[in-house]
Image: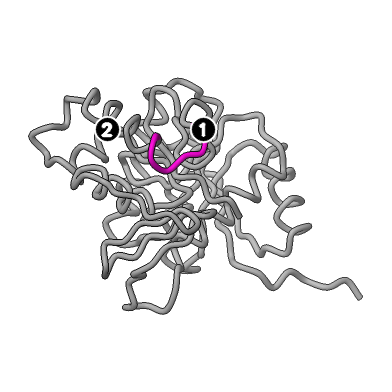
Amino acid sequence: MTAHPTGPLVLVVEDEPQMRRFLRTALDTHGYRSVEAGTVSEAGMLARTHNPELILLDLGLPDGDGIDFTRQLRTFSQTPIVVLSARGQESDKVSALEAGADDYLTKPFGTGELIARMRVALRHAHPGLAGNKKRTFEIGDLHIDLDSHLITRGATEIHLTPIEYKLLVLMAENVGKVLTHRQILKDVWGPAYASRPHYVRVHMAELRKKIEENPARPKLLVTELGVGYRLRDPI
């Protein structure tokens, strides 16, 4: 007898048969269950009836746009969404992320990268028991304790400015997830500063000097060119 996957349920929203076969095989091989939709309307129905734990979403669908679907889904669900699209423009990535997507992969991509991004999105969505907000973070050799406001790297305490601290906590709470410049500005400085991306660049550069072994080649706080930043999950 062939064993059936028993892992998280993934909703695949993709209208190209060849890509659906590729995704079906990749998910099955790695133990994920899956359901498939080829249109926005079908995806909306399956999202409500099957309650998937993750959604893989193409943007170009026959009856609508994946970004609009993301906005609609976010009105009733926080299910993590990883966008899979042939659109490689920075503006498309920013639009998808700001609509509520958790990550963005440009086609073509490999199975290894896909599964890694899915695992990060699932970990971010389910960091612990519901209602218990995480108060400490371990990211590589970086330790963040929100209760004591203590940041250490190895045995060394790191002293941050208030803005740097808010930036680091925001990135840690979204570890593995791309945050756009606009999202970071809104959360750290407020909505009035949404059009000042240079604020983010300057303070991220200073933060890297304190948390990275080599700020010129960051391993933790990485830039997503033209989009924003990601605090990389070393796992």
Where residue 59 sits: x, y (%)? 47, 35
Residue 203's disc number? 2
Q: Is residue 189 covered in magenta? A: no
Across and down, in percent, residue 28 comes to 75, 59
Q: Give the camera-side residue of 197 and 114.
A: 197
Number of residue marks? 2
Q: Compared to 33, does 103 lie above or below?
A: above
Residue drawn at x 72%, y 37% is 18
Q: Which residue is mark 1?
A: 214
Q: Residue at x 34, y 46 (%)?
A: 100
Q: Nearer the viewer, residue 115 or 202?
A: 202
Residue 199 vs 129, above or below: the answer is above
Q: Quadrant of the C terminus?
A: bottom right
The quarter of the displayed image where residue 80 is located: bottom left
Amino acid bearing label 2 = His
What residue range appears in magenta?
209-214
Q: Residue furthest right?
A: 1
209 displayed left or right of 140? left
* Figure coloring: one colour
Q: At which x and y percent is residue 199?
A: 21, 28
Q: Which mark is residue 132?
A: none
Quick one: label 2 or label 1, which is nearer the N terminus?
2
Q: Element type at marker 2?
A: helix
The three-letter amino acid code for the residue at tag 1 is Asn
